[in-house]
Amino acid sequence: AKSISQSRLDDALTNNQLDAIVAPSNGPGWLIDLENGDDGSSVNYVSSSGLAAIAGYPAITVPAGYIDGMPVGISFFGAAFSEPELIGLAYAYEQRTQARRAPELTSVSP
């Protein structure tokens, strides 16, 4: 599986003259029930960076915005040893979009 994933990613990057592949990260976050616990484990999704993870290739995720008040991310992934380029792309995206904001914290009763 690793060599197939590497081959597919390398081909996609090379054949399309790409520095990186960009995709939405998984999906929006979910609300946490402070009394009964986090039910996020029941959310079904496919990771957009799964292919990179299987290949052992680098990926980075940064804030992309919000859906219904819940944060979503965007993932950048690339070829082996492309970490400096991915960090640069992710940083440029963050600077341009300014999508990150401080969370609203909720106090928990004892």
Image (spheres, helix red, strand yellow):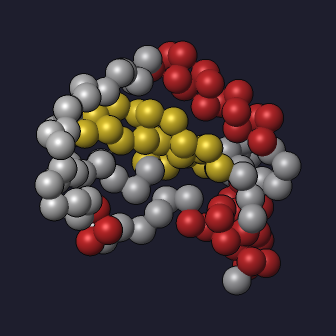
Residue at 51% across, 36% down? 62
Let me know if residue 14 appears in the view: no
- Can you say whether 107 is above or below 82 in the image? above
Is residue 50 shown left or right of residue 85?
Answer: left
Residue at 65% across, 50% down? 59
Is residue 41 shown left or right of residue 74?
Answer: left
- Can you say whether 61 is above or below 107 in the image? below
The residue lying toward the viewer, choosing from 81 and 20, is 81
Q: Point out residue 101 in the picture as x, y percentages from the top left corner.
A: 36, 21
Q: Point out residue 94 in the picture as x, y percentages from the top left corner.
A: 52, 23
Q: Image quarter for residue 57?
A: bottom right
Q: Point out residue 86 in the picture as x, y percentages from the top left corner.
A: 70, 38
Residue at 62% across, 44% down? 60
Taking the view exactly as shown, the residue that stands out farthest to the right is 81
Residue at 43% across, 41% down? 73
The quadrant of the picture occupied by the C terminus is top left
Is residue 37 shown left or right of residue 17?
Answer: left
